[in-house]
Image (cartoon, rainbow, N blue to C red):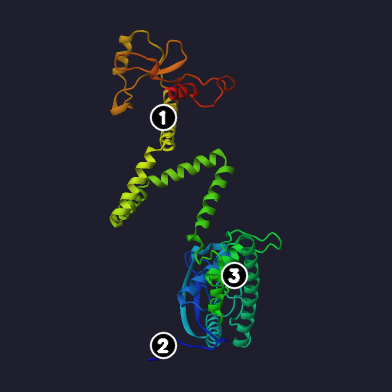
Amino acid sequence: MMGNRTPVCPPDDPWYTAVIYEAWLEHVDPEDPLWHVPYFGQIVRADSAEKNFEARKYEHETGSIRDPKDLGFHAVIGMFGADKIAWRIVSSKPGRQSEVQAWANAEEIRLIAEHGGVLRDMDARLQQTLNLTKGGKGGDPAAVWAGIEAWRRRVLTKFKAAMEAYVEEHESALAPSKYVDADDGYKLGSQLNSFRQGRMRKGMPDKADIDAWAEALPKWAWNGKQTDEFREEKVQHGKDQWKNATEEQRAAWSKANKDAQNRPEVRAASVQARNDWWDNATEEQKADRSTKHKKTLATAEFKAKRSNIATHQHATERRAELKRARPIAVPFVKSQKRRKEMRAASTDFSGLQGNPVLYMISEDGETIRRVDTQGMMRERDSVGRVVDPPVAEAGPSDLNAAYVSELESD
């Protein structure tokens, strides 16, 4: 029945999981001399085998970018890319920290030796590994871990002091992710993220006390992304980006956002989310939402916003129509009867409900107008000027500023 009991270990030798893993260059030309040459590594931490393994993969991939190498496994990642590497867990072992560390050392050394030893030449096909050392952490495992714990304790002490200083000034433990102390350059925001993930507390003998210290801080949150402060930070970041962006960048972002919102799967997900909410809402919640919606529709601010949107959309459509009409507009024909015949014979069926369209230059040569079914060219059927006026004369640089202004006045 021992298998169902939670292991109890001395405070100085907690329960850890050791993982031995293998990585190799897979998704490249098999003729490359490094194809299928293995790398063996170990990781001993307090999480499960799978979590430890995934954490170590991430560290290898980011480490190869942050600190590029000329030889070994990180050099291979840098040369070919992380997506060309295959990974697997060779074996894992839970147990007391000192015991599993000794096991991991022995396994890592054994596997490197059995597969040809350390890397000797990155340009020749040899029986070798991508490891630069024979493996294992030198010395007594207990002494090694004592040094690691001393280092973690020092990092934790510095973090706690910085966090308490931040709390004293801001009355909140929600330091922004990019916050850096102005006095000593300490990156409190990134260290806070590491602390939440367990870098300074998982596997520590006094983890419960460390967690309790954190939870006692004002506005503490284990997941900062679920806080109002994080959402406000994201919104402000977006506003700052928009404010400092060029017109080309803004246009590209707007188009990308519009394209994303118009994707069928996005629209379907949005509709499904609303339907799910309505199906699961109480009658009181439904009534409250309906009341709020009616009040919103009735406000002058909402009506003005909708009016501005409609005006802007109308003006945008007219600018696009003017750009299309200019190269195909025909010279002025005085006879209304002839204009009617020309319109009926038009092969441009871009009008409403597929009706034919005929663009004609006005008699004074200043504007382009649509010809209606009776051959008439009324002022209200103007599309815009034949040629844009000089900026100095026209004021706004809009393609059709005069006509848009006229529309807005109507």
Can residue 187 be spotted in the picture? no
- Determine the residue positioned at 52% across, 68% down: 58
The residue that mark 1 highlights is: 314
Q: Secondary structure at mark 2?
A: loop
Dividing the picture into quadrants, the one containing residue 10 is bottom right
Q: Where residue 252 sits in the image (x, y, percent)?
A: 50, 42
Q: Is residue 4 left or right of residue 97?
A: left
The numbered disc on residue 122 is: 3
Q: Secondary structure at mark 1?
A: helix
Q: Is residue 259 above or below residue 53?
A: above
Q: Amino acid at mark 3?
A: Met
- Determine the residue positioned at 46% across, 77% down: 48
Of 366 and 333, the residue lying toward us: 366
The numbered disc on residue 5 is: 2
| Disc 2 residue crowd, few under 14, some 14–19, many 20+, Cα 10 Å | few
Can residue 215 be spotted in the picture? yes
- Determine the residue positioned at 28% across, 55% down: 279
